[in-house]
Image (cartoon, rainbow, N blue to C red):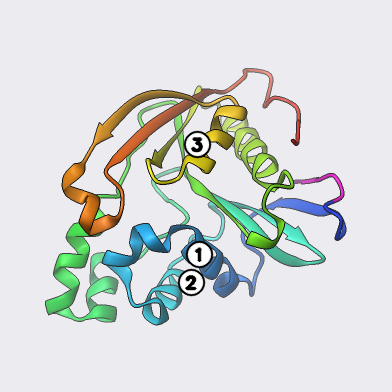
Amino acid sequence: MGRDATDTGMGPVTVRRGVPAGAERQAAELYWGAFGRKLGPALNPPDKAVPFIAAHLNTDRAVCALLDGQLVGLAGYQLGGWALTGGSASAVLRTYGHLRGLHRLLLLALFERHPTPGQLVMDGIAVDPDIRGRGVGSLLIEEVAAVAAEQACREIRLDVIDTNPRARALYERRGFTAVRTEHTPYLGRLLGFSAVTTMHRPVEAKGPRGLRTP
């Protein structure tokens, strides 16, 4: 299942489910480009982080945007106990070593989120900088909403950090509402953000709302 976007000026963007076979590295690079600043203290350096992410993707836990067959955007989500990004504790220790790996595991634990019954947790959106602002993020959100509706979820949940106001503005335009903000000033120096806002969007019983690209 997928959707066709309006013309971006470079051709149509197609939204599909799952990371295409062979595009794992590209997906990891997009993900790192969007979230590397946040995940850097746990997974740096990039030349280790990107291959680690690529090797441990759950490729069926994403919706992807393709332009001329190339991956230009993705949104991950959690379902059935699996998220887009994986990697066990032992995998982290093998990659980074036991001495350096232990504190990385503690940092990664800070990012763990567990859905309540009836929730689908979205893990954020990554879009190629060259096509940002052309409605691709909105298309990805609506495809995630379609997944949530098919899974009989009652709401979609996501977290957005205080240093990413552009993402929050997009989520608000697509029907998400802030429900709480957790202030974490002690993480400011370590992770680069000091507050996390949880947002919810209800899932319509008859399916997701129609596409309304900006």
State left or right for residue 153 relative to residue 37: right
Disc on the earlier residue, 1 or 3: 1
Residue depth check, mark 3 versus mark 2: number of the one nearer the observer:
3
Residue that label 2 marks: 54
Disc sitting over residue 173 in the figure: none
The three-letter code of the residue at mark 3 reads Arg
The three-letter code of the residue at mark 1 reads Gly
Residue 43 position in % (x across, y down): 32, 69
Classed neighbour count for the residue bearing mark 3: other residues with Cα under 10 Å, few (<14), some (14–19), many (≥20): many
Classed neighbour count for the residue bearing mark 2: other residues with Cα under 10 Å, few (<14), some (14–19), many (≥20): many
Q: Is residue 22 visible?
A: yes
State left or right for residue 68 relative to residue 119: right
Residue 1 position in % (x across, y down): 75, 46
Residue 69 position in % (x across, y down): 78, 67
| 62 over 40 or under it: above or below | above
Residue that label 3 marks: 168
| 45 over 168 or under it: above or below | below
Task: Give the residue at x 35% y 29%.
Answer: 116
Residue that label 1 marks: 33
The three-letter code of the residue at mark 2 reads Ala
